[in-house]
Image (cartoon, rainbow, N blue to C red):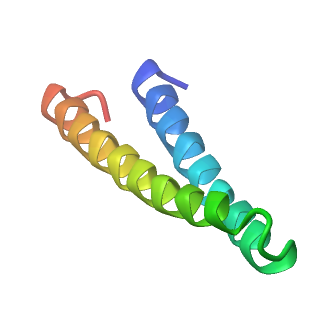
Amino acid sequence: MNKAKFVMFIYALAAILSMVSIGFAFSLIFMTGDKYETIGWITVVLGGVLMCAIFGMAFIQKRKFRDKGLL
């Protein structure tokens, strides 16, 4: 596996982890009641923003790799 594909794999892994954090936050909201509801909603919003940022950086990096002929 070349270095460009490894970097894209790291971006994909980061996106998966942010999606898992969103799912975990929803479980905090709906399973535990009022105690962790605020933390859950904050985590859902932050996870969504983080996921969008990761996808944005990954697409920019993919374009750079494609322009250099590494992908």
- Where, by quadrant of the figure, is residue 35 drawn? bottom right
> Which residue, as the protein is rendered here, is positioned at the far left?
67
Left of 16 or right of it: where is 2? left
What is the quadrant of the C terminus in the image?
top left
> Which residue, as the protein is rendered here, is positioned at the far front?
35
Position of residue 2 relative to residue 31, above or below, is above
What is the quadrant of the N terminus in the image?
top right
Position of residue 24 relative to residue 10, above or below, is below
| In-front residue for pair 12/71 | 12
Residue occupying image coordinates x 47% and y 53%? 46
Left of 43 or right of it: where is 48? left
Position of residue 19 relative to residue 70, above or below, is below
- Where, by quadrant of the figure, is residue 22 drawn? bottom right
Left of 66 or right of it: where is 24? right
- Where, by quadrant of the figure, is residue 21 drawn? bottom right
**Residue 39, image x, y percentages:** 65, 57
**Residue 63, image x, y percentages:** 19, 40
**Residue 70, image x, y percentages:** 29, 27
**Residue 60, image x, y percentages:** 21, 40
**Figure label count:** 0
| In-front residue for pair 71/39 | 39
Position of residue 41 relative to residue 47, above or below, is below
> Which residue, as the protein is rendered here, is positioned at the far top?
3
Residue occupying image coordinates x 68% and y 57%? 20
